[in-house]
Image: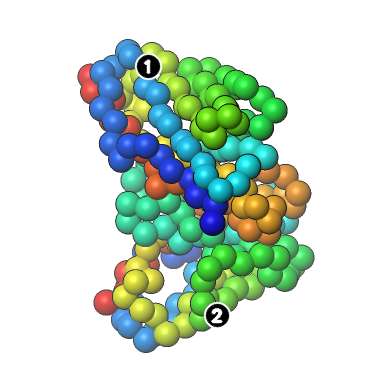
Amino acid sequence: ETGVTQSPTHLIKTRGQQVTLRCSSQSGHNTVSWYQQALGQGPQFIFQYYREEENGRGNFPPRFSGLQFPNYSSELNVNALELDDSALYLCASSLFGTDTQYFGPGTRLTVL
Amino acid sequence: SQKIEQNSEALNIQEGKTATLTCNYTNYSPAYLQWYRQDPGRGPVFLLLIRENEKEKRKERLKVTFDTTLKQSLFHITASQPADSATYLCASLGAGGGADGLTFGKGTHLIIQP
């Protein structure tokens, strides 16, 4: 059984640029959720994808968008990067309707 | 809005003792609470889930309690070891169910001293 994987591991961008982060879900899981974790804080829910559609969204602006593909993998896109977008971005997969989410190692994004 | 609070930012415990971490929730009644472990620069790892109708749950050296009257969960690590040093996160599902994602506390940084 393969766990959740994310790429890249680290990324450095400048303010105003766009970034795409990728996630492969754990084998057998059909739901992907994305979280942003600032230093010293708990993860904050960005959105969730199920059946290739956004199924729920946290308090994040529209410049945070995503995709889910038929193989359940997912992308997180962030446009017009701001300094405050610097954080660890976590992807979590689960089976829809179950309670436990399994997290990937995260992508560390630094915006200069 | 719903909120999860974890009591301490850092907790120092001597090796072999029991570490007890606290999670309080306000403004809602979660159907369950989850506990995760997170090492620096890594993703959270699921440890235990306890439902509102369960008083206590155990897994090896870990024990979790859920008190709906106090609106609190306690997480215990018995016979603590330096390898238990990490940040421990408490989380619950949002009031809107799965589509709201998990709401996390800030976490408690646990340090087990040899």
- Nearer-the-camera pick, A105 or B70: B70
Q: Estimate the x, y position of residue A103 in percent, counting from the top left.
A: 54, 49
Q: Which mark is residue A62?
A: 2
Q: Which mark is residue B43?
A: none
Amino acid marked by disc 2: Pro
Residue at image point 32% right, 56% down: A39
Q: Residue at x 57, y 76 (%)?
A: A65
Q: Is residue A41 left or right of residue B73?
A: left
Classify residue B59 by image quadrant. top right
Q: Which residue is mark 1?
A: B18
Chain designation of label 2: A
- Between B103 and A33, the residue placed more toward the observer is B103
Residue B42 visible at all? no
Dot 1 amino acid type: Thr
Q: Position of residue B50 (x, y in %)?
A: 62, 31
Q: Seen in the image, is B98 located left or right of residue B67? A: right
The chain ID associated with circle 1 is B
